[in-house]
């Protein structure tokens, strides 16, 4: 077991709250690494929307995920680093799932595990991937990869007894299949609490209340890169997007007014030419 995964699981068993953050490239990976206190970094398929400007994550490819994960892995050295397997690269057969997971691990040094989305139908895939020694996290609850109507699938799940029961059954089955942790997305707080109490693996919440073993947020949301995507899941701790726009507009104004570059930015020393012009 790698040291990052071991530290992650030790913190879970000690009863301390786990702290997660997403990253999509080298700069965001550096922020996660240098902030201190981050236990798990997820290279999330939300990069399709946040970074690549796609409508959602469904059209994202494994090659694109690997490309971005490589960049994050160059920055993240201390927290546990895992990456999403995008839609279409693990659902067909357990063998396909293993092949995709192996690609992610082999081509992205520093990545410890993968995350997939679904329910107990993924148990064969989880067993197959873990048989190769690759840790698997599974996202249950809201699963955008399984919704073609990307924008309509942002409401919570597990609000009824039947829905909550299905999620709880899935969580228990996935743990038995070998999942090392669960991401509980947009569950009712009661359902998330019940899942967390009835499994012996970490539950990382996003929009699922405070009863989970830990929390994870999208870095773009909590820093305010752009207009909120799912504001009901996050607190915005900064307004980086608005501040960046102000800075760029100030730059444009200073160039137009011949203020930039100022004398302090100009190389003033001058060596006379050897010949006349």
Image (cartoon, helix red, strand yellow):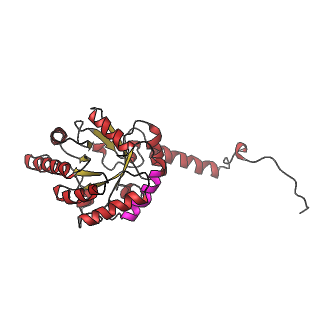
Percent position of residue 221, x then y: 37, 46
Q: Residue at x 73, y 44 (%)?
A: 263
Identified at 8% across, 49% down, the residue is: 162
Observer-nearest of 23 and 104: 104
Task: From the top left corner, tell me how far across and down residue 159 is, in percent.
Answer: 13, 46
Q: Is residue 113 left or right of residue 258?
A: left
Residue 99: image quadrant is bottom left
Asked whether 113 or 141 is in front, the reply is 113
Q: Using residue 30 as the reference point, say whether residue 103 is left or right of it.
A: left
Q: Report x, y in % for residue 230.
A: 30, 48
Asked whether residue 52 appears in the rendered view, the answer is no
> Is the residue 92 above or below the residue 177 in the image?
below
Location of the C terminus by quadrant is bottom right
Residue drawn at (38%, 59%) of the image: 104
Instruction: Judge whether 263 appears above or below 123 on screen.
Output: above
- Number of numbered discs overlaid on the protein picture: 0
Classified by dominant secondary structure, the portion drawn in magenta counts as helix
* Residue segment shown in magenta: 59-73
* Residue drawn at point x = 36 percent, y = 57 percent: 49
**Magenta segment: does it hold 16?**
no
């Amino acid at each position: 077991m790698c040291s990052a995964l071991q530290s992650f699981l030790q913190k879970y068993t000690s009863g301390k709250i786990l702290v997660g953050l997403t990253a999509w490239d080298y700069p965001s990976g550096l922020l996660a690494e240098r902030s201190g206190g981050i236990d798990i970094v997820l290279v999330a398929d939300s990069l399709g929307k946040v970074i690549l400007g796609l409508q959602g994550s469904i059209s994202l490819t494994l090659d694109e995920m690997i490309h971005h994960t490589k960049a994050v892995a160059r920055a993240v050295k201390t927290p546990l680093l895992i990456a999403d397997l995008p839609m279409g690269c693990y659902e067909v057969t357990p063998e396909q799932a293993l092949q995709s997971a192996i690609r992610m691990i082999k081509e992205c040094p520093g990545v410890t595990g993968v995350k997939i989305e679904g329910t107990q139908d993924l148990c064969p895939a989880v067993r197959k991937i873990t048989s190769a020694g690759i840790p698997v996290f599974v996202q249950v609850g809201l699963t955008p990869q399984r919704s073609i109507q990307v924008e309509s699938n942002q409401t919570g799940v597990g609000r009824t007894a039947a829905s909550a029961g299905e999620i709880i059954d899935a969580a228990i089955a996935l743990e038995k299949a070998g999942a090392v942790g669960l991401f509980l997305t947009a569950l009712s707080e009661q359902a998330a609490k019940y899942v967390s109490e009835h499994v012996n693996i970490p539950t990382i919440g996003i929009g699922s209340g405070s009863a989970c073993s830990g929390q994870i947020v999208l870095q773009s949301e909590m820093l305010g890169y752009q207009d909120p995507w799912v504001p009901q899941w996050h607190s915005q701790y900064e307004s980086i997007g608005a501040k960046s726009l102000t800075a760029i507009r100030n730059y444009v104004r200073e160039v137009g007014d011949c203020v930039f570059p100022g004398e302090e930015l100009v190389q003033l020393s001058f060596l006379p030419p050897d010949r006349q012009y």
